[in-house]
């Protein structure tokens, strides 16, 4: 497996892999979805009953929305994960942490959410108890609307987990890949270069000095329109998809950066294959 090119822009990554079998690239996709640890809110405490402000005015906290819907929305808000600590193995599941299940900065982040209506409560209203850097990265995720005399007071705790357990811990989304083919143009058989180029729905070809050329190979989606014999000449263009080159794309929800995610997933796969190899050796 070789990486020919990697482009990372914000939370999105595009990586061109070559010399790789389809099952390996799929294993990487699955590992990215289920293996990357991240912090997510999985425990909340909702204040029920009247909430008083500093002027003695009271707000009702039981009316706005069902507790479980608020809990579900909070759990899906991406909260930052300290990737340096994660890669060094300092971030831990609460049950495996040295704090003996009490809760500490290595295994949990605590937030408070305290708003009174009328307003829309957003993810940005979650206040971390401690470092301001732990505020949710996306501040504008709507959680609930409060009308006059409605209020909300919640204490939420985030813990480490992986997408294997629940979607709230899935850091990588929209992971997918497609093969990059090899397109061969047999110039002596091309009768109508303009027609072949014009019929490609992905604008893969260009015609330069009446000669058909490949302009953007990675845009090809293997529709094989260019291979149609009635288009511009019999056997003028052939598309070979078995090249073992893939364009791999994914994005993260912001809690983990794409570079950390891909390094972690590749390490995890390597570890699994080594374990499998050892297991096989023991069988012999
Ligand atoms: Zn701890």
Image: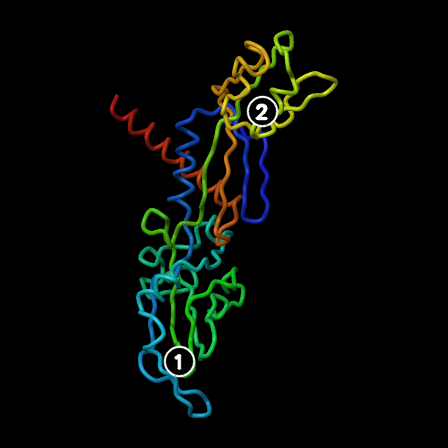
Q: Is mark 2 within 8 Å of ligand 1?
A: no
Task: Please tell me which residue is depicted at 60% across the width and 20% down the height of the picture.
Answer: 196
Above or below residue 83? Residue 138 is below
- Image quadrant, ligand 1: bottom left
Above or below residue 18? Residue 28 is below
Res. 150 mark: 1
Instruction: Quadrant for the C terminus, please.
Output: top left
Task: Please tell me which residue is depicted at 45% across the width and 40% down the height of the picture.
Answer: 175
Between marks 2 and 1 in the image, the one whose residue lies nearer the viewer = 2
Q: Out of 83 and 113, give the one closest to the viewer.
A: 113
| Residue 165 relative to residue 121: left or right | left
Q: Can you give x and y, in whole percent of width and height, for residue 51 in the image?
A: 38, 84
Q: Out of 264 and 56, give the one closest to the viewer.
A: 56
Above or below residue 239? Residue 67 is below
Looking at this rendering, what residue extends furthest in the top direction?
188
How many marks can you see? 2
Above or below residue 152? Residue 160 is above
Looking at this rendering, what residue extends furthest in the left direction?
283
- How far apart are the alpha carbons under marks 2 and 1? 60 Å
Res. 252 mark: none
Q: Out of 106 and 38, give the one closest to the viewer.
A: 38
Q: Can you give x and y, in whole percent of width and height, for residue 21 in the image?
A: 43, 24
Task: Please tell me which residue is depicted at 47% across the width and 56% down the height of the picture.
Answer: 81
- The 10 Å Cα crowd at callout 2, few under 14, some 14 to 19, many 20 or more, is some
Res. 199 mark: 2
Task: Please tell me which residue is depicted at 48% across the width and 62% down the height of the picture.
Answer: 141
Q: Can you give x and y, in whole percent of width and height, for residue 238 in the image?
A: 54, 15
- The 10 Å Cα crowd at callout 1, few under 14, some 14 to 19, many 20 or more, is many
Q: Can you give x and y, in whole percent of width and height, for residue 246 in the image?
A: 50, 28
Task: Give the structural element (helix, strand or loop) at label 1.
Answer: loop
């Amino acid at each position: 497996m070789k990486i020919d090119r990697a482009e990372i822009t914000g939370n999105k990554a595009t990586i061109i892999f070559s010399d790789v079998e389809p099952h390996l690239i799929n294993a990487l996709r699955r590992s990215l979805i289920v293996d990357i640890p991240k912090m997510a809110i999985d425990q909340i405490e909702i204040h029920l009953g009247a909430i008083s402000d500093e002027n003695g005015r009271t707000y009702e906290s039981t009316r706005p929305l069902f507790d479980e819907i608020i809990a579900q929305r909070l759990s899906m808000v991406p909260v930052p994960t300290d990737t340096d600590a994660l890669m060094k193995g300092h971030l831990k599941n609460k049950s495996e942490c040295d704090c003996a299940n009490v809760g500490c900065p290595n295994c949990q982040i605590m937030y408070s959410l305290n708003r009174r209506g009328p307003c829309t409560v957003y993810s940005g209203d979650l206040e971390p108890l401690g470092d301001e850097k732990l505020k949710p990265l996306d501040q504008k995720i709507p959680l609930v609307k409060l009308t006059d005399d409605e209020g909300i007071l919640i204490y939420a705790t985030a813990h480490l987990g992986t997408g294997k357990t629940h979607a709230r811990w899935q850091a990588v989304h929209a992971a997918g890949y497609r093969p990059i083919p090899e397109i061969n143009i047999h110039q002596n058989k091309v009768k109508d270069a303009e027609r072949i180029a014009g019929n490609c729905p992905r604008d893969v070809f260009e015609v330069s000095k009446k000669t058909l050329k490949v302009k953007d190979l990675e845009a090809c989606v293997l529709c094989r329109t260019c291979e149609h014999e009635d288009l511009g000449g019999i056997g003028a263009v052939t598309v070979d998809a078995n090249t073992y080159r893939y364009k791999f794309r994914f994005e993260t929800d912001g809690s983990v950066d794409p570079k950390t995610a891909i390094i972690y997933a590749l390490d995890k796969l390597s570890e699994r294959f080594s374990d499998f190899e050892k297991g096989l050796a023991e069988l012999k």
